[in-house]
Amino acid sequence: MTDQNPLESIEEAAAEAAASGHELTPFVKVENGFQATCKLCEMTTWVGHSGIRYSILSDQCEKQPSY
């Protein structure tokens, strides 16, 4: 968790999710911040207006395709 610009936190969350095999939807504004969902496993990540982050994404997406 951090107290920074929400755009920076969104970029960090998206990069971490991609590195873990998650395919996030675009972040959308929700009541208390911004949220994105993994298209594969349907878990979410959230960023507050102050940049604080909360994620229930696993360290490795369980539904990512294997090539």
Image: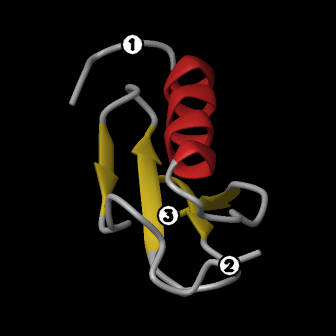
Q: Is residue 31 left or right of residue 66?
A: left
- Looking at the picture, how far across and down is residue 46, in whole percent? 43, 55
The answer to whether the residue labelled 2 contacts the one labelled 1, judged by CB atoms less than 8 Å apart, is no
**Sequence order check, earlier mark of 2 and 1:** 1
Q: Nearer the viewer, residue 30 or 57?
A: 57
**Sequence order check, earlier mark of 2 and 3:** 3
The residue labelled by disc 3 is: 31
Which residue is depicted at the point 50% across and 39% down?
16
Residue 48, placed above or below residue 62: above
Amino acid type assigned to the residue bearing label 2 in the image: Ser
Give the number of the mark in front: 2 or 3: 2
**Disc 3 secondary structure class:** loop
The residue labelled by disc 2 is: 66
Quadrant of the drawing holding the C terminus: bottom right
Q: Image quadrant of residue 1?
A: top left
- Looking at the picture, how far across and down is residue 29, in whole percent? 66, 57
Q: Residue furthest top?
A: 4
- Looking at the picture, how far across and down is residue 39, in whole percent? 70, 80
Give the number of the mark in front: 1 or 3: 1
Q: Is residue 33 left or right of residue 54?
A: right
Give the number of the mark in front: 2 or 1: 2
Answer few, some or many: residues within 10 Å of disc 3's Cα (few below 14, many 20 plus, some between 14 and 19): few
